[in-house]
Amino acid sequence: MPTTATLAAGLAVASPAEHPRPRPRPVATREEELAPARAAMASAMENYFDQHKSRSEAVESIRAANAARARGSPKRPMPPPLAPMGVAATVGLGKSRQVDAQVLMAKAAGLPILILTPTHELADEYCHRNPGAVHYFGRKAPQDGLNSTEQGDHTCYKIDPVSRAGDNNHRPAQSLCKTCPNGASGVLHFVRDAARVEKCREFFKVNGLDPAKTPPCHFLHLGLPKQLSAQILVAPAAGFSEAMAIWQEHDGHVITRQAQRLVIVDERTAMAREIDVGPGHVSTWRDRLPSLRERTAKTIARLSRRENLDEHDQDELGKARALLDLLPKIEALFQDLGAWIGSDQALDAERVINLHKQIQRAGASMTGTADWEGISYDADDDEFFIPLRALSTLAQNCKDGTLRQEAGHLFLYEVSPVIEWAIRSGSIIFLDATMSIPMRQLITAVDGAIHEAQAEQNMVVTRHMGHLYARGQVKSKEYPRAAKTYMSDLEKIAAQLPRPAAVITHKSYLRYAQEAHQAPLAALNAAGEFKSKRGVAVGWYGKHERGQNDWKKHHLALVGMPLLSPERIAGLYAAIRAALALAGLYRPEWDRIMDDGKANHGVRLPTQPEVRGWLLDEYAQTVAQAIGRNRAVNHDGPPLTVQLWGGLQSAEFDAALGRYGVTIHDRVQNTVHRTAEDYYNRGGGVDAIDEAVNALLESGATVSRSAVRQSIQAANRAAPRDTTISARLTELRAQGKLPPASAGGRPRKNLFPCIQDLEDMGTGFQGEDKDNGRGKENPELQTPTSARRDGSSGQHSADPKPADATGSPLLDIVAPGGQEQSDALDGRECTDLDHEWAADAVAELERICAEIDYEVELEHQGHHDQTNHPGDSS
């Protein structure tokens, strides 16, 4: 498998300006053309199922032989895991169909299967197509008005604590549920194991609780076992646990058979999750050490009083003594760890790794949870104490060099249960139309294979070059105005799309264009209004670019694309480093160096080849998946239209798109969005401002931004925004058409009743005097103002001067070629200070124009990414 650096080098090639377009086809030939690719994919998946079936039969045989072996004879070893398989198939080629075929084979062979999807909606679709399949659901809050016997099988009475436990990196069934009174009551109601029942009775006795008044947990003892016993189980990937991957047949409460499921992961899944550790978390661990010391001392005293300790008691005593000896070292480590995190000092990784090993040997860290990280229950307040579970992950990250530290926080990365299961246990198929570089590397690192099922997509892709259409700074007070501007762009883009059509853009455009943008359904309401008005569907990144089939055979426009902040890039890259490290692959740490962004309209990318190649690949996956909503691979007839507006527009990004079957056929300039420069070049808003300025000067009023706005509004015209008015006034003063503002910010006294007076008078500056470097007067233009007022050649004409190409009658005062003009008024000679003022004014104009143009408000400058993760998290 090529390295990411090699792949990145392959991405950084210049794409040709044009590519051959899809050839015309007779109608109803796509099925015939795609048949070979589909048959090859079906054969590869069927072959993998046969390998899984053979291994399952071998495991059954070995288990039976080991159970029947003579006492003292060696056990037969189990066969090695079946390495994972990847299927990279073009969107719409029929991955789901092949999964349905796997379900039929599993039913025929009597083998269990687990299908993991990104959403509950897709899980519903699988269950609808496959009768007998069970849709996995997690815990649900109890229904009001029902007693405990009437509650559903998924009822959990501690939903909020369970959620907090998950947020603090605990696995609730292995932690919180063991200390929950409702869970203990469930054991008394539904479990026949005498030891467990006695333990739960002791729990109620110690905590002073009445089991008769404590409703039993239904989820752990009814809902979960029923779901896990289903032969065909379909579940959201985020809810995966090892228990799902093992099928158990029951006779009452007795397990009669166990078998490893074939796991199929449909669509992309997260490789690792980020854990944020702050000094406060470490302080909590440290605060729990005294109680741990007290419990350990009591254990030692209790066991020391016994005579003739058995092997188990001797082991427990030895571990307790070892832990007691370790506690001073643990406390010292926590003290230093809090200081390291708070001051962003590098951790002593070797010290953390070694101490964690000693903690494990002392039995103080079981199943990845240290004793001071355990969840405890307070019966008096009916509250759970849930500290962060992170020490085991910290030690692993120190070992792999994958932790990240910045801004007084430590970021750890725990490999997702699905990926961990794939590496350790196998018998898993990953289906993804845009399989990422890291996932490909992980599969091949554990001796897995990837089947490529690619087919040409019947579409023509046009890139509209120019404006970036980044999300922008949603916290800016100007953002709602910008969002409305972008919605206007979307309407123009939608108007020229063939029908049926759909648009995918940023959710914030739709949401903040609404007056009630804080309403929960603001974006959805905007999408509905857009569809009603324009007849074009509109969706957003994070929800509609993956896992939905509503826009088959639609023409598409992608307006902008998600861009990641440097912090988000660092986090995602560290997460894949952690996942690959578990498979024995070690990527270099990112050096955090970014380019200047000039090659990508201001979007800065990492310069490090490994990271740059990976990030371009991530961006390309999102765009390719969004395009795939049209299912162009199955489309008969004329090619579908796909338009890419904004986003990355470089050759290396187009090459990354090419890896996923997206070819750019045409490149044209954006004719929809107006930047500040376009705005002025087209005369937008300038006429209204100039007319207001002329009216103020005629009346002798002071020219200011607020006065101009009031004048425009008094004429019942739409006033441009304040930054536009300020920019125009600055421009007029820089060109000498208005007197400069005073040091206090107020305009100086008006010297002319109308701007056109200045135009007709010309200026008094001829050029630079070589002797003293100062401007000299043109004697032909030094006629007193009063002389020109009474009919001289300088008299103001009643007919307005013809407008220039911009539509403004004011902009032709500057001489062609940029010849310097004088600020001399009423015979005053232009000074060096005046020249400095003009330069400062021009610089200020440029700054204001930059603020107007939201193209520079890039998504990667200080906002949280949105992708993430499946579904709409924004």
Image: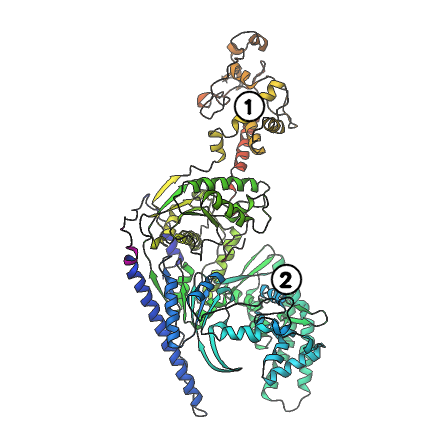
Q: In this view, does 69 lie to the left or right of 856?
A: left
**Is 621 inside the magenta-drawn segment?**
no
Q: How crowded is mark 1: few (under 14 residues within 10 Å), some or many (20 or more)?
A: some
- Residue 246 percent across, percent down from the top left: 47, 75
What is the magenta segment's predominant secondary structure? Answer: loop
Figure quadrant of residue 324: bottom right
Residue 695 placement, left or right of 432: right
Label 2 element class:
helix
| 652, 42: nearer the viewer | 42
User: What is the number of the mark on residue 338?
Assistant: 2
**Which residue is labeled 1 in the image?**
691
Spot occupied by residue 665 in the image (x, y as percentages of width and height): 34, 45
Going by the numbered disc 2, the residue's amino acid type is Gly
Q: Which comes sooner in the sequence, label 1 or label 2?
A: 2
Residue 587 coordinates in the image, percent (x, y): 45, 60
* x and y percentages locating residue 410 in the rendered image: 58, 60
Asked if disc 1 and disc 2 are in contact, CB closer than 8 Å, the reply is no
The quarter of the rendered structure image containing the N terminus is: bottom left
Instruction: Quote the CA–CA distance across marks 1 and 2.
Output: 64 Å
Q: Is residue 449 left or right of residue 786?
A: left
Crowding at label 2, few (<14), some or many (≥20) Cα neighbours within 10 Å?
many
Q: Which span of residues is magenta-colored?
A: 25-32
Residue 119 in view here: no
